[in-house]
Amino acid sequence: MAIERTLILCKPDAVSRGLVGEIVSRLERRGYLLVAMKLMQLDGERARKHYGEHAGKPFFDGLVEFITSGPLVAMCVEGEGAIDGCRQLIGATNPLAAAPGSIRADLAQTIGRNLVHGSDGKESAERELAIFFRDNDYVSRRHDLERWIYEK
Ligand code: DAT
Ligand code: MG
């Protein structure tokens, strides 16, 4: 394993439902560290870039419309194996198939309003983080990493 960074979004449904704190809390309780965080509203261009792998699929236009429909919270989350670990906390894409205890199983009902985005691999994490953050948006949590997470 390695210390990884991943992009997590609290999508507009999460902001609108007042679930940002709940979602951030679950990530923090796992021990993951926030190293960048931004409340923002996406324009169509950036939304299409972020979800580029889904271009042409039947749900693509609705997905872009939804993700741009209101403010979202973008985060860079850091930790040991954080990419897969966050996907585990988030749960399967369809809340009905998500493991009980995951964010989507506990808090969401439908695939189109599943509250959270998490990068699905190293390459997508890097690509997606660059869409949302610049180099100087990141803070170092090295001290917390060493104190709480890193196994020496
Ligand atoms: P995930 O968000 O779990 O990585 P994904 O990358 O396959 O899932 O899809 C991105 C988002 O697109 C997903 O969170 C919700 C939406 N989506 C995916 N499949 C869908 C479908 N069949 N119908 C409606 N929305 C869908
Ligand atoms: Mg995905």
Image (tube, rainbow, N blue to C red):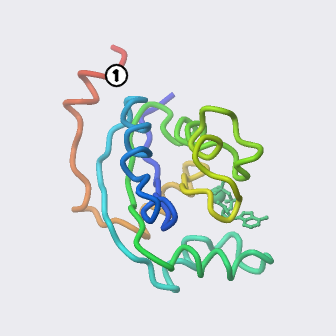
Q: Quadrant of ligand 1?
A: bottom right
- Residue under label 1, please give it: 150
In the image, residue 67 sits, relative to residue 81, either above or below, namely: below
Residue placed furthest toward the top: 152
Who's the residue at 54% across and 35% down the image? 85
| Residue 49: x %, y % from top left | 55, 77
Identify residue type, mark 1: Tyr
The image shows residue 97, relative to residue 111, as above or below, that is: above
Mark 1 burial class by Cα count in 10 Å: few <14, some 14-19, many 20+: few
Residue at 39% across / 30% down in the picture? 29
Residue 86 visible from this viewpoint: yes
Q: What residue is rendered at 62% in x and 46% in y?
A: 104
| x then y, percent, for residue 25 | 38, 39
Residue appearing at x 25%, y 61% in the figure:
137
Q: Could you tell whether 110 is left or right of 137 in the image?
A: right
| Residue 61 coordinates in the image, percent (x, y) | 68, 82
